Every structure is written in C-alpha cells, then in structure tokens.
Image: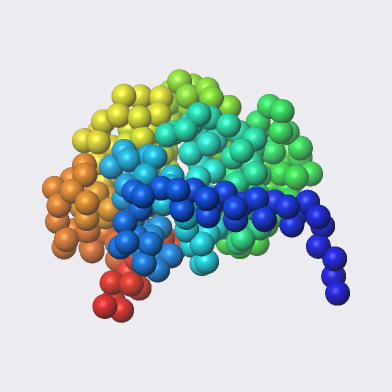
Amino acid sequence: MRKVPVSLLLTALLSVLAVNSFADSDSKLSDEFIDAQPRIQLYMAYAEFKMGNHQLAQQMWLSIGGSGRAEALFNLANMYAQGVGVKQNLKQAVSLYRESAEAGSRSSAYQLGIIYLNSSGFQNEERARYWLTVAALDGDNDAANLLAGLVNNDSSDPMSEVQALLINGETSLALDKLQTLAEARPANIRAITRLAWLYESGLAVERDLARAAELFMQAAEAGDAEAQYAISVMYQTGVGKPQNGQQALYWLERSAAQGFQTAMNKLTDKTAK
C-alpha cells in the first residue's frame, strides 16, 4: 500500500474541517444552494460575486465539494491573490491554488506558474516550469507559450506580466498596462476582459458595472469565451445589463461552444431540464 505523506493528510483534514465548520456556522446559504449540484452552486456563487456580494460568494465557494471543488478553490485563491473581498494574502492564495491544481484545475496550475515565475518571495523557476507544464499538457495555450518563452530565454508575455503585477499588489501599474494593451491596434482582447473584471470587482479602480459591462461586451463580441460567459451572467442576473433570458442563453451558448468549462456545465444543466 502506498504511503501518503502526513503533511498531505493534515492539509486535507484541515481543509475539510474548515469548510464544514464554515458551512455549519453560517445561515446565509439557502436550501436551494445547499441542495443544488456542484456546477449549479458554482454558477450561483459566481453570480453573487458579480453582484458584489463577495462575502456570500466566499461562503458558497468554501462549501462546494465534489466535482466543483477544484473551481471553487481556484475562485477563492483569486480573492486572496488579488485582495478582492478579503485581505490580500499571497501565501494563502498559493496554498489554495496548489490544492485546486492537485484537484485538476489547469487554471490554478497556470496561476502557480505565474507566481513562481514572477512574484517576489516565491520565485522558483523549477516550480514555475512544473506547473506551467501541468497546465500546458491540459491544453492551456498561455502556459504553453510561456514555457516556449522560457526555453528561448524570452518569458515576456504581457498578460502574465499583468497577472504578476496584480498578485504583487501593484494594481496601478497593472491598470496602466491593461489600458495600453486594450487600446492598442489591434487590441489585446484578453486585456479588455481583464480590465472589465477590474471595473466589476472594484480592484485598482472605482467599481463601475456599466463600464465593466461595456468592456465585457466588447471582448465577447471579439470572441473571448470568458467575457461571453461574464456577459451571460450579467443578463441572467440583471446586474450590469438589463435582465434578458434570451441574451443570457445566447452568450452562454457561444462561450460553451468555445469550450469554456463553466459555461458548458451551466448549459448542460439547462438542457437537462
């Protein structure tokens, strides 16, 4: 029988205890949420986050298990990495990203690669290469490009630089770089989506849902799957856009068609009903 390191057992046990105690001690989680499938719980938590209910979204993500665990941990890690809804804590973010990556999240593997590549106090090229490889093998093109850059001694990817700035708390510099990339000709569509997220969350700028919606729509129309999903949720919830079920479904289908996993999960649930 293969021995499991004691440290891993302790980490897993503490995670379970933390989630259970948080869920049991809080009465804000509705029966509808508690009884829902993990993919629906993820959607509900994301919707609350987009409405600015960061504490409730955090509680929801903490309580999600099963097939939704990896994505929930990724979202929690993002909160700690960038200080949205919680005090920024990169050490906690790294721990959550690692747990999420080990549960199968390629997005978390990519973020770990970025942190180990660029973040002061965490820089470790060997670990960066490992996690970028994990993400690349799972189909992450950004991770593959960064790995190729490392091989060629050129790791200058503008969006990875933005991520590093945000993680390091240099939000003003990140904002300036995003705006430059978004206004370039041709524009960097990923930068437009990330800029929209800043306006939606209120990180580095004053929260402005109208501006966030405008940017998400620009990126969605240009074909960015993440932005298409974000605008779908806005139409579904009526936050940032007028509530419109047809438009919500339209953009959800477009995002899912590009393989955006959260959109695919939500669409599967809708068609199953």
110 sits to left or right of 64: right
Q: Can residue 233 be seen in the rendering of this structure?
A: yes
Q: Quadrant of the C terminus?
A: bottom left
Q: Position of residue 42 (x, y in %)?
A: 40, 58
Where, by quadrant of the figure, is residue 184 drawn?
top left
Way the structure is coloured: rainbow
Tell me the residue at 54%/43% (across/down): 77
Tell me the residue at 30%/63% (across/down): 32
Q: Position of residue 144 (x, y in %)?
A: 63, 53
Q: Foreground: 202 or 249?
A: 202
Q: Quadrant of the N terminus?
A: bottom right
Note whether 107 is above or below 256 in the view shown.
Answer: above
Tell me the residue at 41%/24% (across/down): 204
Tell me the residue at 32%/40% (across/down): 53
Q: Position of residue 46 (x, y in %)?
A: 36, 51
Note whether 187 is above or below 104 in the view shown.
Answer: above
Q: Foreground: 209 or 51?
A: 51
Q: Foreground: 50 or 224?
A: 50
Where, by quadrant of the figure, is residue 176 drawn?
top left
Note whether 162 is above or below 149 in the view shown.
Answer: above
209 sits to left or right of 179: left
The single residue placed furthest to the bottom in the displayed view is 272
Q: Position of residue 103 (x, y in %)?
A: 61, 60
The total number of labels drawn is 0
Q: Can residue 166 be seen in the rendering of this structure?
A: no
